[in-house]
Image (cartoon, rainbow, N blue to C red):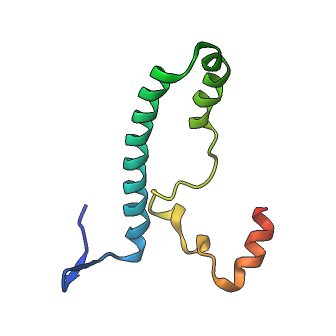
Amino acid sequence: ARASVFIAGGQAYVPRDQLASLVVGAFRSRLSKALVVASRRWALHVAGEEKDRLTPVILSLSKRYLGRDYGKAGSEAGAADVITLKDLNGAAAQSF
């Protein structure tokens, strides 16, 4: 993959279509590290009866998100997914 970033005056300018994947990548990296820390703390600090009650909830969290994967590029991330200010009220009504 070729990186196309414009650098000027100490600033890096990233194309808009690549920005989401950069943000998502950074978010996933930080989230992964935080989950490792949380997992270690979970094993050390959760009492036996709480562990039985909360373990199924924690284990099911990874399967609950059903929304769009913003890290994928290509046909799934087309212009139809862009919401403008004039479309905001309609999109909100459809989503909620």
Residue 18 image-quadrant placement:
bottom left
Residue at screen point 59% across, 75% down: 82
Question: Looking at the image, is 60 positioned above or below residue 25?
Answer: above
Residue 11 pos. (x, y %): 24, 80
Residue 5 % position (x, y) = 25, 75
Residue 48 in the image, given as x and y percentages of width and height: 59, 13
Residue found 75% across the figure and 70% down from its top: 92
Pinpoint residue 39: horizontal percent, then vertical percent. Answer: 45, 29
- In the depicted view, which residue is nearer to us: 36 or 61? 36
Name the foreground residue: 28 vs 73. 28
Q: Residue at x 64, y 40 (%)?
A: 64
**Residue at (64, 25) in percent of width and height:** 54
- Numbered circles on residues, count: 0
- To which quarter of the image does residue 68 belong? bottom right
> From the image, which quarter does the C terminus lie in?
bottom right
Q: Residue furthest top?
A: 48
Q: Is residue 71 left or right of residue 76?
A: left
Q: Is residue 38 left or right of residue 10?
A: right
Q: Quadrant of the N terminus?
A: bottom left
